[in-house]
Image: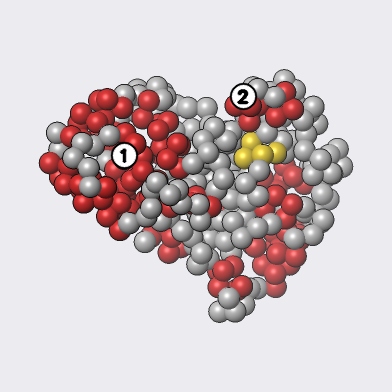
Amino acid sequence: MIIPEENPMSMEGVELGKKLFNDPILSINNSISCASCHIQSFSFSDPNQFSFGTDGIHGTRNASAIINAGWHTSLNWDGSAMSLEEQAFEPIRNTLEMNNSWQNVENRLNQDEEYKLLFKNSFNIDYIDSNHIVKAIAQFERSLISNNSRFDKYIRGELQLSPSELNGYAIFNTEKADCFHCHGTNLFTDNLFHNNGLDTDPFQDLGLGKITGEINDNGKFKTPTLRNIALTAPYMHDGRFQTLEEVIEHYDNGGHYSSTIDPLMKKLGIGLLLTNQEKQDLIAFLHTLSDVEYIND
């Protein structure tokens, strides 16, 4: 796990971060919290295609699930943040999200005696500032670890998967479906950015290209983790697919050509040519990645 030297984990810090994560005090009108768009029962994602901010206006991307984020080398669909601390700065001042100012948030928390005591116990500070607020939230997010799915138990030798699930696992890890190229790690993400053939040129959302300014990065988005994937619909950066079946159909059809299409999309114009049974088996395997304890703990 990536833990910055300047923000070591502590029980007090994690509990404080959890309280902040769930407290609408961070938003301009006390109407939404981090948890409003990152709902635990949906593996800290949003079942809506787009999340709504304090003014009732929705954003343009689906809220990413927060799972094992302490191992991620960048955050957000476009990689705009390089750490959980940096990412936590963004929603407060985003006009489509909490639409607040950090000065206003600091003033509120410093007028709250409970928060003053919690920050004193967590960081030994007398004045609550934005740097320590995001440090607490980041500590909580690093504590959100999912490692007890049926697949994890299978790997540990604690249970056996069904024939359908095992066949789906085999399809996942071969050129038959090509999933493993981007999702073949224990995190089920390569932490990289790809154009997976969702759109043709010109792109409505430049993704990574908007951050780097490089034309070759246009249309590329971060690979999401597949852990708890059955719990985190809708799918893709813009939530365009409502079901896993739709996601599988996208790849089975081969995707759409564009100037930055990823070389790993090798079946472009041809498709994977999966049978209906193979599609069902692949989805059965993806369901083994669900960690029920994670959403109920």
Residue 141 seen anywhere in this rendered image of the structure: no
What whole-number distance in Å separates the C-alpha atoms at marks 2 and 1? Answer: 28 Å
Q: Name the quadrant of the C terminus.
A: bottom left
Q: Which colour scheme is used?
A: secondary structure
Instruction: Give the residue pinned by disc 2.
Output: 210
Query: Is 57 on the left-hand or right-hand side of 148?
Result: left
Tags 2 and 1 touching, CB below 8 Å: no
Question: Who's the residue at 43% across and 49% down the image?
Answer: 5
Query: 160 or 245: nearer the eye?
Result: 160
Q: Residue at x 82, y 56 (%)?
A: 175
Residue picked out by circle 1: 133
Q: Where's residue 211, x and y in %?
A: 60, 26
Q: Which of 12 and 6 is in front in this view?
A: 6
Q: Position of residue 188 (x, y in %)?
A: 62, 55
Give amino acid for label 2. Answer: Lys
Write the residue at 30% across / 51% down. Answer: 13
